[in-house]
Image (spheres, helix red, strand yellow):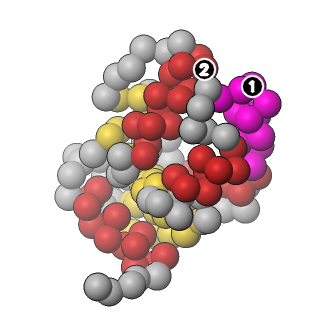
Amino acid sequence: IKIINGKQEAYYGFVSSANSTNLRDFIQIDIGGSSAEIVLVKDKKLIKSVSLPYGSIPNTNNFNLLNKVSQEDEDKFKKTIFKEFDKYPWIKENKNLSVVTSYFVYLCRQFTRINKLKKKKNYGNAYLV
């Protein structure tokens, strides 16, 4: 077993998504058990990355995502995540969002129940690869 740091985890997520999509420019988000790696990709090259402490376990515990999500919990989740994203303006630099994670499906199901949206494999500009 080899323990890798957030930068390495972001790189491996980048390799996976870059080889799994035809998009050349995108932001890739990989939400794991205890962290989320976000990678800016331009022309299929890793430009910037960050590892954040927002994985499935802390998100579920901190924002009560295990059961029915209340409006208060949803608002708290959004406020926290968007405040964190504001620290990294490069996250907003691209509109094509490629997502590499099975936890993304869980989040989409939660927000689908909240917003009564149709379940699709393509969530707007988000692509599940």
- Asked which secondary structure carries label 2, the reply is helix
Q: Is residue 18 left or right of residue 51?
A: left
* Dot 1 or dot 2, earlier in sequence: 1
Q: Position of residue 45 (x, y in %)?
A: 34, 67
Which x, y percent locates residue 71? 75, 25
Which amino acid type corresponds to the residue marked 1 in the rendered image? Gln
Q: Residue at x 46, y 82 (%)?
A: 5
The residue that label 1 is drawn on is 71
Establish if 5 lies above or below 115. Answer: below
* Image mark for residue 110: none
Callouts 1 and 2 close, C-beta under 8 Å? yes
Mark 1 → mark 2, Cα distance in angstroms: 8 Å
Disc 2 target residue: 114
Find out whether residue 42 is within the magenta segment.
no
Return the residue nearer the eye: 27 or 10.
10
Q: Quadrant of the C terminus?
A: top left
Please tell me in which quadrant of the rendered image residue 32 appears.
Answer: bottom left
Which residue does the image show at 37% across and 50% down from the upper left? Answer: 101
State yes or no: residue 73 in magenta.
Answer: yes
The part of the chain drawn in magenta is 69-80
Residue furthest to the front: 67
